[in-house]
Image (tube, rainbow, N blue to C red):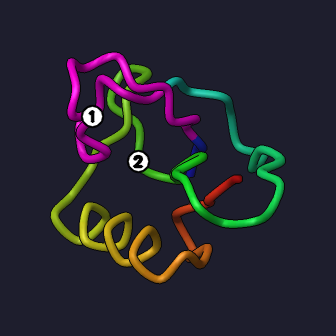
Amino acid sequence: MPWYVYNPVDSFPHNPCSPNNYVLIGTTPPSCPAPNNFLCAIQASDNMGSPIITAALCQEIALALQNRIDTTNVLLRS
């Protein structure tokens, strides 16, 4: 599955579950240096260059941010 870098464009507060806030970068995960405090990238199915963010992926994003740990489909950065 492709990776997408988090690049918020929605008005504040930013919604990490909005596909508009991501840029497709390809199949290689990006470098996201520690500590794990902020959203860096997600891995998701593609919909014409935008991620398909399911309810399960949105929950995975929330849990990763809450626990400050990377998950299978979510990478955090400093």
Tell me, yes or no, whether the two marked residues, 2 and 1, touch with CB atoms within 8 Å: no
Tell whether position 8 is magenta.
Answer: yes
- x, y percentage for residue 7? 49, 26
Q: Is 4 positioned to the left or the right of 30 in the image?
A: left
How many numbered marks, from 0 up? 2
Looking at the image, is mark 2 or mark 1 earlier in the sequence? 1
Secondary element under disc 2, as helix, strand or loop, is: loop
Amino acid on which disc 1 is placed: His
- Residue named by callout 1: 14
x and y percentages locating residue 19 in the rendered image: 29, 32
Which of 72 and 63 lies nearest the eye of the viewer? Answer: 63
At label 2, the amino acid type is Ser
Above or below residue 16? Residue 49 is above
Q: Nearer the viewer, mark 2 or mark 1?
A: 1
Nearest the eye: 25 or 62:
62
Q: Is 7 or 11 nearer to us in this picture?
A: 11
Residue topped by disc 2: 45
* Left or right of residue 50, residue 26 in this image: right
Mark 1, secondary structure of its residue: loop
Residue at 46 percent across and 73 percent down: it is: 64
Q: Who's the residue at 47% across and 83% down the image? A: 67
Image: magenta residue range: 4-22
Q: Is residue 32 left or right of residue 54?
A: right
Instruction: Judge the density around disc 2: few (<14), some (14-19), many (≥20) Cα neighbours within 10 Å.
Output: some
CA–CA distance in space, label 2 to label 1: 21 Å
